[in-house]
Amino acid sequence: MRIIIVIFYFFLYLNNLNATPMADQEIIFKNLRCLVCQGQSVADSNSDFAQTIKLVVRDQIKEGKTEKEIYKFLIEKYGEWIVYKPPLNKSNSVLWLFPYLIFIIGGIMIFLLLKKRPNR
Amino acid sequence: MLSNLGNLILFISAFISLSIIYISFVNLNDGKTVLRKKIYQLCLFQSTLIILSFFVLVSAFITSDFSLMTVYQNSHTLKPLLYKISGTWGNHEGSLLLWLIILTIFSFLFLVYNKDHPKNYRLYTLITQNFLIIGFLFFLIFNSNPFSFLSPIPKEGLGLNPILQDPALAIHPPLLYVGFVGSSIYFSAAISSMLSNYSGKPFALSIKNWVLISWSFQTIGILAGSIWAYYELGWGGFWFWDPVENASLLPWFAMTALFHSLIALEKRNLFYFWVIILCIITFILSVTGTFLVRSGILNSVHTFANDPSRGLYILLFLCFLIFTSIFILFKKFQTNNYKINSNSKETFVLINNWFMIFYLVTVLLGTIYPIFTEVLTSQKISVGPPFYNTVIIPLVVLFLIFMSIGPNVKWIRDNFKNLNLLLKILAASLIINFLIIYFFKSYSLLSNFIIISSIFLIISTFLDLYKYSKKKLFNLSRLVSHLAFGFMILFIGLNYNFSFEKDFNLKLGDKKKFADYTIEFENINLEEFKNYKSVVGKFNIKNYSKNLNLVLSPEIRIYENPSTLTYEASIRSGLLKDYYITMSNIDRSEFYNIKFQKKPFMMWIWISVIFVSIGGFMRIFRNEKKIN
């Protein structure tokens, strides 16, 4: 058992070594919708729009902005349609919380179903 | 001529469906215990006619008979024969005819294969199924008629969307439809089971194989679509959480939950109404999927055939289905007092369903939520891969652990005596994961958990295999599916973390160096084919440290009918990894945009999914053997 814990901590440590502090542009491109395409991300598209957005994002990374700040900037400019991960705000709260609510309710239902049985 | 013939057949089929419903109702109340022979004959006649009408349409496509609107809009004389034929179901009207084929064939086969079940149950199933058939026939005849006549007759057709001219996509719809539409038969059976009060084990036995058939085909169908997306869309991914892809995944979750619950219904007579609800949900999700795809309400890469009026009809039909089923369900619903021990297989069946419903709700909500925000707040939002990855993946870890333990737990009551063994398996998984990190590279914490839990599932399933092979008490189908599922998650995890991607612009004759790779843009050729022209690039890819030297030739295709540009990836598939390259022209420039990717274990993801579905097929054969 102790060995497991040691190993566990070891790979946690390894992970931290490789953590990149800089915003990763490829990941950002993948999370942005190409607004002039049919369901394509900026990373996957070659349209002029995608090229422009790529330039903008690269510039912002150079300026030292974080991933979140870049998304915020783009949302202000183009609306929430541009990001594939909708920000957690009032109108999206149902989207983010309802699945977990279902999961919790499901768990409670199973728990109650099992509890009903008197221990014989 | 073909137009008249086709229409005639469709009208006769609608008439036959009405007769089947009428005769079935008469048969219900005639006091006899057997079905009338006439019903069998009519059902056989019905499916034969629908198949015939389909062949009429196929022959219209083969002979390029442009007097038919559908053929004119989706075919062209210069197309290769294969794509003339697959064009038949590559469009909305033709694919609906495929729906009908499956509806009628399943209706007939269900009737024939369930002779030892009571008369009323079979008749009500038949009646419900024929209501569905009529619903779709009316839709076909009055809204989406594949045989509508066009005059004056055009000389040439408009052609098929080039990205649909592909072997994987030629077989993708039929496979998926067996899954989608196949679920209609257990929807009908569920309604019938409530109407005729036929429940418990015999009901479970009567639908078991049908659920498995649709599930196995659905799995393979999703795979075919995924493979197609991988090489045709040219982005290197195989799953984009696109609305249309989600539409095929939703019934899959419901089916998976269903056949696990069905085992509990068969063995322990538990969860009857839950099984009924799942049967209904599965079919309703299939129709919803069709609605989402056909109405064009969502922005998708896969939107090929949409028209709002179609959407409206399907939506009305869908509401009718939902309200009728809910009405019957409420009338018949009884609460049952189940006694379930927490350490029993029953609990794990519930846990499976718990997760499946969670996945289902997440994907459904993510797919339709943008519609709601747009209508309610006129705010357009996108729900894409990062949302699903954030919500779903952490819970996959837990699910895999339950999936490893569940199958070994006994029915009714068990005690966890093998906790020690589980810890050993966990230790082994941790060590393997650590070795991967040590020798290759490290990845995020979540990826660690995914890979550990999938290895955990793989090892425990292998141990089961070993244990069972000694006892000769085999349930190989389950082992195959679970093992393959574990491998699928493992390979997807590794693929995600070990993929390498480079995006750059290159001129003819230039070289690009990065990491250990050198890519040379050697030359470019214009080639002419039967129905398209192609700009073929030749790229030399070298990696000295790995002794790699290969030539890939991505294409830019120029299709004339309809005039479209498509970008064809060039892929070198290998046992361990795929090399993937696409090129695209940049306007007003002599540079080309090149995307180079190394995708490990792609082949193994496909193979795993094939084995997941093979497990399903094996179970069907085993069930059949048991009965005989």
Image (spheres, coloured by chain):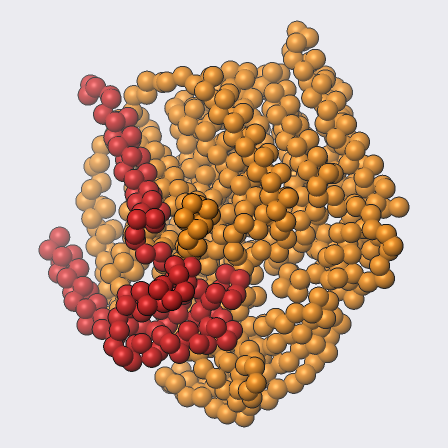
Chain colours: A red, B orange
Left/right of residue B286 with respect to residue B462 in the rendered view: right
Q: Residue at x 86, y 52 (%)?
A: B151
Q: Report if residue B263 is visible in the image.
A: no
Outermost residue toward the left?
A2
Left/right of residue B330 with respect to residue B46 in the rendered view: left
**Which image quarter is the C terminus of chain B in?**
top right
**Residue sitting nearer the eye, B273 or B505:** B505
Q: How many marks?
A: 0
- Residue B299 locus on image (x, y percent): 52, 56
- Residue B193 locus on image (x, y percent): 53, 21
Outermost residue toward the bottom?
B509
Q: Residue at x 37, y 36 (%)?
A: B353
Q: Report if residue B520 is visible in the image.
A: yes
**Residue sitting nearer the eye, B475 or B206:** B206
**Residue sitting nearer the eye, B49 or B461:** B49
In the picture shown, does residue B208 fall above or below A98? above
